[in-house]
Image (cartoon, helix red, strand yellow):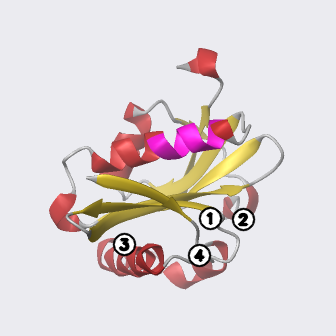
Amino acid sequence: MEFIRTDGKNKDFIDNCVLLDMDLDIRVGRLIKREKYQKYNQLDEIREAIVVYEDGKAVGGGAIRRYDDETVELKRVFVHNEYQGQGIGSRLVCMLMEWAMELGYQRMILETGELLVESCAVYKKLGFKVIPNYGPYVDMPESLCMARDLRKDAF
């Protein structure tokens, strides 16, 4: 398994995001009008992304995006269905947290949904706590926002 740092313009990262959107449409698309989220998931502001490869094939990816001077937002994390349950997502998020710390960020935030039970479990396992919905998600009750301190003494 290889974890390669890249950016939001990487074709494999973009393809992974397309698969993520397709997966979300299947999982929650009947219950949530997902199109309202599209403007918050644009890749043009993604400067730090990681693509996960197995034998040269992209099997997952995720990214971070600056939120403010101290805070970075976790974005577009997805591991292909056939590779889920192997700890790849947890490892990917940890690598993105490490990268955020290298860049000087103190805190990581994310938006997910209660319907995404597996994702919520991974984030909680990694020390994320539920916070009030932030920014564009304030008026989206189906959103679940979480945060985690990134300072070394928080581990």
The CA span between labels 2 and 3 is 19 Å
The CA span between labels 1 and 3 is 14 Å
Would you say residue 98 sits in the magenta stretch? Answer: yes
Query: Is the residue under label 4 in contact with that under label 2 (CB below 8 Å)?
Result: no
Would you say residue 93 sits in the magenta stretch? Answer: no
Of the numbered discs 2 and 4, the one sitting upstream in the chain is: 4
Q: Which residue is mark 2?
A: 136
The CA span between labels 1 and 4 is 10 Å
**Label 3 SS:** helix
Query: Is the residue under label 1 in contact with that under label 2 (CB below 8 Å)?
Result: yes
Query: Is the residue under label 4 in contact with that under label 3 (CB below 8 Å)?
Result: no
Instruction: Work out whether 23 lies above or below 100.
Output: below
Give me the disc on residue 37.
4
**Label 4 SS:** helix
Query: Is the residue under label 4 in contact with that under label 1 (CB below 8 Å)?
Result: no
Q: Which residue is mark 1?
A: 140
- Say what amino acid the circle numbered 2 marks: Pro
